[in-house]
Structure formats: C-alpha cells, structure tokens
C-alpha cells in the first residue's frame, strides 16, 4: 500500500511540474502514473549501472555529474513513454532537480500524517 501511495505522490509531482515548466509536458494523470513507474524502474535498474560506469568523472566533478545521469534517465523515460515529453537536456536537468525537491516535500508530508 505504501508503494502505491508513493507512486501516486510521484505522479502528482510529475503533473505539477508539467504545469509549472514549459519544456515538460504530460498528457494525463494516467500518463503521469506510468512516468512515475518507469522512472522508478529506470532508477532501480539503469541508474546504478550508469553511476558505476561514470564513477571517475563523478568523482572529478564532486558528484555534479549525477545531475547529468538524472537528466539522461528522464530523457530516456520521455523517449519510452508516449504522452510525456521533455524539450531538451536543460529542461531535463531542471525537471530532475525540481522533481527531487517536490518529492521530498510530498513524502515528508506523508510521513507526518502516519
């Protein structure tokens, strides 16, 4: 049940950011739920591989290259899902930063209610 609530909160964050950011769009709430699921799967499967492969450059940039990895994950999700688009690399970075921030806020509200 907790997983479903977290996915729905992530989908809500995706919808909110699609209204706020002009370079990001999502067609419907169902598409946002699919985006939340796909981003979760990509973060679980693909991100660790990318982090290991790019470890030297991540260390050299003091971890800032992780922003690039997050943007790549978001662009990959945008290519996989019809109805979800990101205009470019910089919009993906902005979306990534704001999504993490908004998810932290929404999940902290959820923890206070329990």
Image: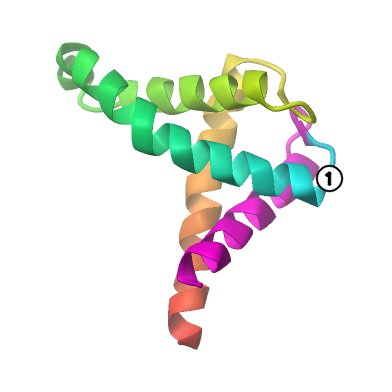
- Res. 17 in view: no
Q: Residue at x 48, y 25 (%)?
A: 73
Q: Tell me the magenta residue range.
A: 1-25
SS at circle 1: loop
Viewer-nearest residue: 49 or 68: 49
Is 62 left, or right, of 8 in this rendering? left
Residue 9 point in image, percent of width and height = 60, 61
Is 38 left, or right, of 34 in this rendering? left
Residue 110 point in image, percent of width and height = 50, 76
Name the dominant secondary structure of the magenta segment: helix
Is 40 left, or right, of 35 in this rendering? left
Is 49 within the magenta?
A: no
Residue 29 point in image, percent of width and height = 79, 51
Q: Residue at x 55, y 55 (%)?
A: 102
- Res. 56 in view: yes
Neighbour tally class for label 1: few under 14, some 14-19, many 20 plus, Cα within 10 Å = few
Residue 35's place in the image compared with 63, above or below, is below
Residue 31's place in the image compared with 2, above or below, is above
Q: Quadrant for the C terminus, please.
A: bottom left
Q: What coloring was used for the rendering?
A: rainbow
Q: Residue 86 is drawn in which quadrant? A: top right
Q: Residue at x 62, y 60 (%)?
A: 8
Residue 4 point in image, percent of width and height = 55, 64
Q: Residue at x 67, y 49 (%)?
A: 33
Q: Which residue is mark 1?
A: 28
Name the outermost residue toward the right.
27
Total numbered labels: 1
Q: Residue 19 is drawn in which quadrant? A: top right
């Amino acid at each position: 049940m907790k997983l479903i609530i977290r996915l729905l909160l992530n989908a809500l964050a995706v919808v909110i950011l699609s209204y706020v950011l002009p370079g990001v769009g999502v067609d419907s709430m169902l598409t946002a739920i699919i985006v939340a699921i796909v981003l979760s799967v990509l973060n679980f499967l693909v991100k660790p591989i990318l982090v290991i492969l790019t470890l030297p450059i991540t260390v050299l940039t003091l971890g800032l290259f992780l922003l690039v990895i997050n943007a790549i994950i978001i662009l990959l999700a945008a290519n996989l899902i019809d109805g979800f688009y990101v205009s470019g690399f910089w919009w993906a970075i902005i979306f990534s930063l704001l999504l993490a921030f908004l998810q932290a806020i929404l999940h902290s509200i959820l923890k206070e209610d329990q």
